[in-house]
Amino acid sequence: MAVQISPSILSADFARLAEAAAAVPNADWLHVDVMDNHFVPNLTLGLPVVESLLRATSTPLDCHLMIEDPDRWAPAYAEAGVGSVTIHAEASKAPVRTLRQIRAAGARAGFALNPATPIEPYEDLLGEIDMLLLMTVEPGFGGQKFLDVVLPKIRRARALIDKHGGQIWLQVDGGVSEQTIERCAEAGADVFVAGNAVYGADDPARAVDGLRSLADK
Ligand code: DX5
Ligand code: ZN
């Protein structure tokens, strides 16, 4: 599958989100980190801001829910019209139901694993998932250091996805930069979230192109 880049607006100016979206017209997605200060020790934004962003950009939104009760909220994000909704394995109490509700509302269903959460217990869920997100930092903040310890899991996930034979995208999120993206791509990731590496750059659109060409080798 072609490489996709999803800039994380967590590293943008929250008072200028429309400009942040417009700054990366070459992005495949805009990654929106929803944090509730319970699942992770940080608080960002919720559905009203996502609804405003939907009106402000034509780039599809990739909503990553780092919240304690994704089963309660995920369907509403899908119904609002975002392109992809990702729930965390560690937070969802009914992932099969919630993933199905996301799909039924017309969005892609994403399933995220923290660095220490193994993939193997979820193998039987692959048929319910459109995108597997492997966190390459502990979730909660942008600008953290990439965790190499996750690389073997990216390889195992790629093998499981290929064995499954479905069209599941494999996303990595956290510390993805020009220094780390090639290792992720080599391990089998194909969708790359990047916050600091895009919005910390002088020219965010150029940073997107740079990341894409490094991952696309
Ligand atoms: C962290 C978020 C990430 C974050 C990535 O919990 O899920 O999406 O924005 O930021 P960088 O790329 O700066 O590590
Ligand atoms: Zn994220």
Image (tube, rainbow, N blue to C red):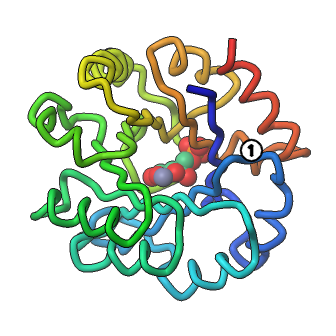
The one nearer the camera, 23 or 217, is 217
Q: Is residue 101 above or below residue 62?
A: below
The picture places residue 40, in percent across and down from the top left corner, at 33, 62
Q: Residue at x 54, y 36 (%)?
A: 191
State which quadrant residue 93 falls in.
bottom left
Left of 155 or right of it: where is 205?
A: right
Up/down of 41 relative to 112, above or below:
below
Residue 175 visible in the picture: yes
Q: Is residue 79 above or below residue 170?
A: below
Q: Is residue 155 left or right of residue 52?
A: left
User: On the image, numbered disc 1 is attached to which residue?
Assistant: 198
Q: Nearer the viewer, residue 114 or 144?
A: 114
Using a 10 Å C-alpha cutoff, classify the residue at mark 1 as few (fewer than 14 neighbours), some (14 to 19) or many (20 or more).
many
Residue 9's image quarter?
bottom right
Q: Position of residue 91 (x, y in %)?
A: 19, 60
Does residue 137 appear left or right of residue 152 in this picture? right
Does label 1 point to a residue whose CB lies under 8 Å from ligand 1? yes
Give the quarter of the figure containing the C terminus: top right
Looking at the image, which residue is at 71% across and 39% down?
197
Front residue of 47/195: it is 47
Q: Position of residue 1 (x, y in %)?
A: 55, 26
Amino acid type, callout 1: Val
- The reply to whether residue 143 is visible in this rendering is no
